[in-house]
Image (cartoon, grey):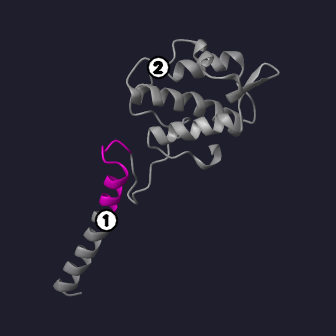
């Protein structure tokens, strides 16, 4: 390969990278989203990933959005991946991990967005899933396929 061919390949690779960066900037002018090398939003898995900020219901808008995401994503994960609802004790733990002081964090959500069956909590397939997707969009992350 000639030096000119090497330079052309480098230019082509840099153009692809520049296009990806422009796409990222266009989708996220404030620069707060997390993108992979293809310019796609990073997937956030509540079972393995940590939020980039501490979820806190009395914190900044970003912290509050992560609070909502963690609440709904953890519940949905338990429902889908383990095929069961969250026990009352687990519901308290989910709320606390999500940035609430205690289990009363569930009180701010309308009952139709989750349901209690036989004492266990489930995310509603319609409203609960809509909230999950909205919070993922708010924090600019992608929902894992199995939770969507």
Dot 2 crowding, Cα within 10 Å, few <14, some 14–19, many 20+: some
Q: Quadrant of the N terminus?
A: bottom left
Give the residue number, with chain letter if any, for mark 1.
Answer: 19
Residue 107 appears in which quarter of the rendering?
A: top right
Q: Quadrant of the C terminus?
A: top right
Could you tell me residue 133's position as x and y percent? 57, 41
Dominant secondary-structure state across the stretch colored magenta: helix
Badge 1 marks a residue whose secondary structure is: helix
77 up-or-down from 93: above or below: below
Q: Which residues are magenta?
A: 19-33
User: On the image, numbered disc 2 is attached to which residue?
Assistant: 57
Measuring 43% from the left and 17% from the top, which residue is drawn there?
Answer: 58
Report the residue at 30% width, 43% height from top: 30
Residues 54 and 133: in front is 133
Near-viewer residue (105 or 34) = 105
Estimate the x, y position of residue 146 in percent, counting from the top left.
64, 47
Question: For this view, does 125 lie left or right of residue 32?
Answer: right
Residue in the image at 40% along x and 60% along y: 38
Residue 106 as seen in the image, left or right of residue 99: right
Magenta residue check for 21: yes
Nearer the N terminus, badge 1 or badge 2?
1
């Amino acid at each position: 390969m000639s030096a000119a061919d090497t330079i052309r390949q480098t230019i082509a690779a840099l153009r692809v990278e520049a296009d990806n960066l422009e796409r990222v900037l266009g989708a996220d002018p404030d620069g707060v989203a997390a993108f992979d090398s293809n310019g796609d939003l990073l997937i956030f898995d509540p079972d393995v990933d940590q939020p980039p900020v501490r979820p806190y219901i009395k914190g900044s808008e970003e912290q509050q959005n992560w609070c909502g995401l963690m609440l709904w994503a953890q519940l949905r994960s338990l429902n889908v991946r383990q095929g069961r609802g969250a026990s009352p004790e687990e519901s308290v733990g989910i709320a606390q991990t999500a940035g609430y002081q205690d289990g009363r964090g569930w009180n701010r959500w309308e009952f139709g967005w989750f349901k209690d069956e036989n004492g266990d909590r489930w995310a509603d397939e319609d409203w609960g899933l809509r909230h999950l997707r909205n919070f993922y969009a708010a924090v600019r992350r992608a929902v894992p396929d199995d939770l969507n």
